[in-house]
Image (spheres, rainbow, N blue to C red):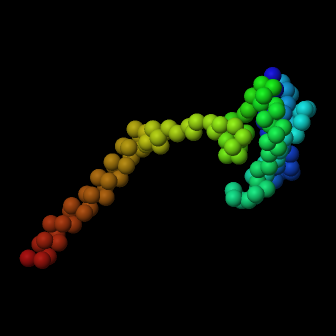
């Protein structure tokens, strides 16, 4: 099975990726059939050279039945070469869990207790 995926190159802490067509059994940075583009995550998001793709060759390999990795599918969707994948959004993931909810309640009660105690003393001072 053929896959359109990224192969890492570049030095330590300076990643640079080649978008390649490779056999799915080949190692990530191993043998590939053809280089289809590049991705440089060190460049700003709006930089023109951040993602470069050879649209003609990618379409050719997709017509031959090549599968696309998740990250490359996002690139192809933004470039208009292939339909963009559905965005994964799970808002329930951001909701605090039970322990955090308990801690938040305890903090609020602790903060409210001195304020309540200070209220009668302030009224007595005014009278």
Could you tell whether 127 is left or right of 27 in the image? left
Query: 108 and 61: which one is in front?
Result: 61
Image quarter of residue 92: top left
Image quarter of residue 85: top right
Query: 76 and 114: which one is in front?
Result: 76
Instruction: Please state, as top left, top right, bottom left or bottom right, where the C terminus lies in the image.
Output: bottom left
Could you tell whether 33 is left or right of 58 in the image? right
Q: Residue furthest top?
A: 1
> Residue at the spot x=37%, y=49% of the render?
104
Could you tell whether 13 is left or right of 125 in the image? right
Image quarter of residue 21: top right
Q: Position of residue 29 (x, y in %)?
A: 86, 37
Q: Is residue 67 visible?
A: yes
Q: Is residue 71 visible?
A: no
Could you tell whether 80 is left or right of 110 in the image? right
Instruction: Please state, as top left, top right, bottom left or bottom right, where the N terminus lies in the image.
Output: top right
Count of numbered circles on the image: 0
């Amino acid at each position: 099975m053929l896959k359109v995926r990224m192969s890492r190159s570049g030095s330590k802490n300076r990643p640079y990726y080649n978008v390649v067509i490779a056999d799915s059994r080949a190692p990530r940075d191993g043998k590939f059939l053809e280089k289809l583009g590049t991705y440089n995550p060190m460049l700003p998001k709006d930089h023109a050279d951040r993602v470069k793709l050879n649209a003609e060759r990618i379409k050719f390999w997709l017509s031959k039945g090549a599968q696309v990795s998740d990250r490359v599918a996002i690139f192809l969707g933004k470039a208009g070469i292939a339909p963009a994948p559905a965005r994964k959004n799970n808002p329930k993931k951001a909701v605090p869990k039970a322990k955090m909810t308990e801690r938040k309640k305890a903090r609020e009660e602790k903060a409210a207790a001195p304020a309540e105690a200070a209220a009668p003393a302030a009224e007595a001072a005014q009278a």
